[in-house]
Amino acid sequence: MSSAQVGTRYDPITLEVLWSRLVAIVEEAEATLVRTSYSTTVGEADDHSAAILDARGRILAQSPHGMPGFIAILGNTARAVLKEIPPETLHPGDTIVTNDPWICAGHLHDFNLLRPIFYQGKIVAYTANTAHLSDIGGRMSSETPDLFEEGLQLPVIKLFERGRPNDTAMAFIRKNSRTPKQIIGDLNAQLAANQIADRRIQEMLQEYGLEDLEALSDEIQTRTEAAMRSAIEKLPDGEYHGQVYSDGYDETLTIKVKVTVRGSELYIDYAGTSAQVPRAINCPFNPVYAESVFPIRTALTPSLPMADGGLRPIHITAPEGSILNPRRPAAVFHRTVVVHNCQAAIFQALSQMVPHGLAPNRVHGHSGCIWAFRFRGLWHPEDRRPQSAVDDFFVQAYLANGGQGAAGGYDGKSALSMPDNCANIPIEVYENKAPVLWLRKELTTDSGGAGTQRGGLGQSFEIRVLGKGDIAFALGAGDKIVNAGPGILGGGPGGRAYVAINGEPVFARRWISAKEGDLFSIRNPGGGGFGDPKRRDPAAVAEDVRLGFVSAQRARDDYGVALGADFSVDAAEAARLRGGA
């Protein structure tokens, strides 16, 4: 947007310098969190996010690497927290904490820390972060019927006051974890991240001679709002619909969405979505909001920096009592089983604007998403226990990414977490945290949905249990065992997921006892394809077969491409199979 359009107080260069400085501060805070964390969930899988908020609790800057499930909600969380503990009661050195799923990121393991930043005697900003702490008690599986079985619930309280720790709160957290040293280590990492952001904001204000950040924040909010409204106005007015399915726990669940475009406003309504269930797969509204904003920002303004202004034209609702807006005390631990389907339903709705309003490369088939599983148990005296095992218990999650859904113009990335952006944990790190051995880890042939653009491949694993003690296994954010992730605009579905122990398929949403020597076979889902598979370049199909992404049989059946022994395309047979397509 031009300066005249938004009534700027800053010339473009100064604005860019200051805005980039804020983003750099958040990135340094996140790097501090990762470097000083104890768990693989935070330090390796990047299950965290951080932000700078202005004095009114509006998102001012957020790292572009932050999890989409956290990104848009830190402002909502901060404002809810400040209703409980008003700004006038805060002092330098205070830190507020809560893990309330309806205030924070949807389940008890995501802890939010908020710290006021004081400069020249007044609050000028807040620094906030959210991180997934690996164990806070509870059953930690989808089988729980309500929130009270899911672990420690922390109300909105001060974890630090005037720089002094709340020893009682720390003791409660420590006593409710199977891995207390690891949990406190991660909490200290969150505290360190907020401290570094506080210091850097004060340095920035002093360096540029600013009294506060209010004028800069107003500028950023105005510009991001104007950019989002401009993008929405380019879409054709109307109602657009999408519907996808989650495996659920006891039965398949429906995620239904209506996207309405009206001028510069965009409305997302989940009416018709399944009701909440007495299992730990319900999702409080905050993560639903964040996961719904993600496909809109991806499709309309992919390069727009995150700020509250860009969210103002987007209005999201879900029926109270549904799986996407459950009533307390619904169980929510594995809410990602359901919520990761939201982006696919919205992309389906947006695809109805292609090519009149949206380019094909702005919509995706369903993605395989995060596919988490965990091993839990006690170290046995005869186990080869690594020095890095700081607790007697081990509780180790593995975030195994499925395939990304394809979009117009490019194939889906393989083993890429979408809509969230958690990293694949190196198996060497995991093997040093739990008594298991990876025998195989590879991309799964034929798991990418067929299409003009192929969906990304999922992964397959074989894991041997080495531990001699009591060990349990449970699936985390795993979906698409029953219902494959659909393609888009004629693309085929991604490959379905699978879990087996010693060759026998199992229902792994509950804890399963494991013993030394047991072999776990795990396959996570692939991404959906984009467009008619018969229109895919035969040379690209041949290359997929050569690389092992697609089998020769599926090349023939799905793509209508016959190949010779040297992967050459039989043009005459392909023409016959494709029927002149």
Image (tube, rainbow, N blue to C red):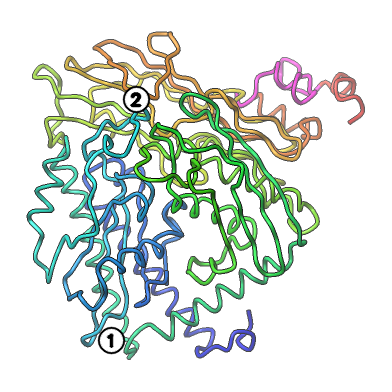
**Amino acid carrying mark 2 in the image:** Ala
Residue name at image x 35 percent, y 23 percent? 510
Residue name at image x 12 percent, y 20 percent? 380
In this picture, is 19 found above or below 152?
below
Label of residue 206 in the image: 1
Q: Which residues are magenta?
A: 548-569
Q: Is residue 381 magenta?
A: no
Which sits in the foreground, 171 or 252?
Answer: 252
Q: Is residue 445 left or right of residue 523?
A: right
Nearest to N terminus: mark 2 or mark 1 = 1
Category of crowding for the residue at label 2, using alpha-carbon neighbours closer than 10 angstroms: few (below 14), some (14–19), many (at least 20): many
SS of the residue at dot 2?
strand
Where residue 501 appears, as percent x and y from the top left, is: 38, 12
* Number of marks drawn: 2
Where residue 119 appears, as percent x and y from the top left, is: 24, 83
Where residue 329 appears, as percent x and y from the top left, is: 34, 42
SS of the residue at dot 1?
helix
Q: Which residue is mark 2?
A: 474
Quadrant in which residue 122 is drawn: bottom left
